[in-house]
Amino acid sequence: TLTWHFKAPMVHDFMWAADNEYVHDVVPMENGPTLHFFYKDRSELKENWKNLQSKTVAAMEFFNKNIGPYPYEQYSVIQGGDGGMEYAMSTLITGERKFGSLVGVMVHEMAHSWFQHVLATNESKHSWMDEGFTSFISSLCMNEIMGQGMENPFDGSYRGYYALVESGKEQPQTTHADRYDLNFAYGIAAYSKGSIFLSQLGYVIGQDKLMQTIRRYYNDFKFKHPVPNDIKRTAEKISNMELDWYLTDWTQTTNTIDYGIKDVVAEEDKTKIILERVGLMPMPLDILVVDSDGNQETFYVPLRMMRGEKDNPYPSLKRTVVSDWAWAYPTYELIIDMPKEKIAGVSIDPSQLMADVNRENNTYQAQ
Ligand SMILES: [Zn+2]
């Protein structure tokens, strides 16, 4: 009798797979775990499953660098299951996929090693912290290791979220995973809106601070069961801003964001830009102004309740920090030191990382 003993310290679930048709490739990483690949011995699978191996190394390196060190000794990518599913130290993936899809699923499931197995959030209660954060980091990873070169790698998440808002079927992210009326509403709330929680947090506190927040969150809460307040407090400590309003509106309500440029009015040699908050959810604003010579500068309108400011996200452009948008005022008057006829265009949030549900009113162009 041959007896196998498998040891898996510090995990909260496990999976095993066996098939006497499996090919078993082993790829030891220099400063990291040993990667194992198990797939059916079929000629039509071989090329993709061989090419997958260097991408798995690249993904492991990406997550180690951007989230924190993978704490286990091995990770296995196994052909099996009914799609893609994450397990401690392993994933089961259906094998007959196009290469991009095979890599995409591997990246997503492996990212769950951080956002589920080490940061063991209750995914029934806070699915957005699990699937959403996994989707966020997977989008960044795919953009890098597959050389996608996307300006906004989260574009698909934003489109999904806007479609959900448009459908009128949205339920808040505090809904238990089993209590969504539609699977569509669960999927978008968890994966897409959960991913935007982070990409949009990068807009609020700055991209560097966002990535610091993720690394600090991992370091402080690894092998624990973090709850929504933990990611918020971590971001507050890193950014020196108050972010209670962000967690509340984004995750506990279906309030949407919609800012607009209501009017642009000449005031002698200055210009008054009247900004309007149409949606219920408040956000700080980056305003880009382009003059008739093509010069660009930005204006930053923080929210008073943040009690802080982010760094200039466009260091090559002059930025003016103007007075805070206070309380729940629906409008704000931005006075800029430029005659109206000199202004060629104004736009709210050129990064489009703020999930504004109506971008039609985000720009002004001189006639
Ligand atoms: Zn997932």
Image (spheres, grey):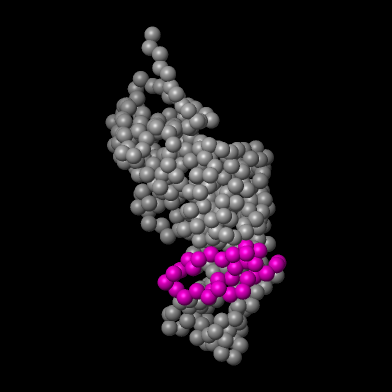
Q: Nearer the viewer, residue 114 or 164?
A: 114
Position of residue 256 relative to residue 4, above or below, is below
- Is residue 367 visible in this depiction of the protein? no
For the point 51% across and 37% down, the residue is 118
Magenta segment = 299-328
Q: Residue furthest top?
A: 1
Q: Any magenta on residue 318?
A: yes
> Residue 345 in the image: x percent, y percent?
51, 78
Q: Is residue 33 left or right of residue 138?
A: left
> Residue 229 in the image: x percent, y percent?
63, 48
Q: Nearer the viewer, residue 333 or 262?
A: 333
Q: Any magenta on residue 247?
A: no
Q: Residue furthest right?
A: 328
For the point 64% across and 51% down, the residue is 251
> Residue 70 in the image: x percent, y percent?
43, 39
Locate residue 89: give its quadrant.
Answer: top left
- Quarter of the figure with the N terminus: top left
For the point 64% across and 77% down, the residue is 333
- Is residue 313 visible in this depiction of the protein? yes
Locate residue 99: give its quadrant.
Answer: top left
Q: Is residue 146 left or right of residue 12?
A: left
> Residue 45 in the image: x percent, y percent?
32, 33
Q: Nearer the viewer, residue 319 or 108?
A: 319
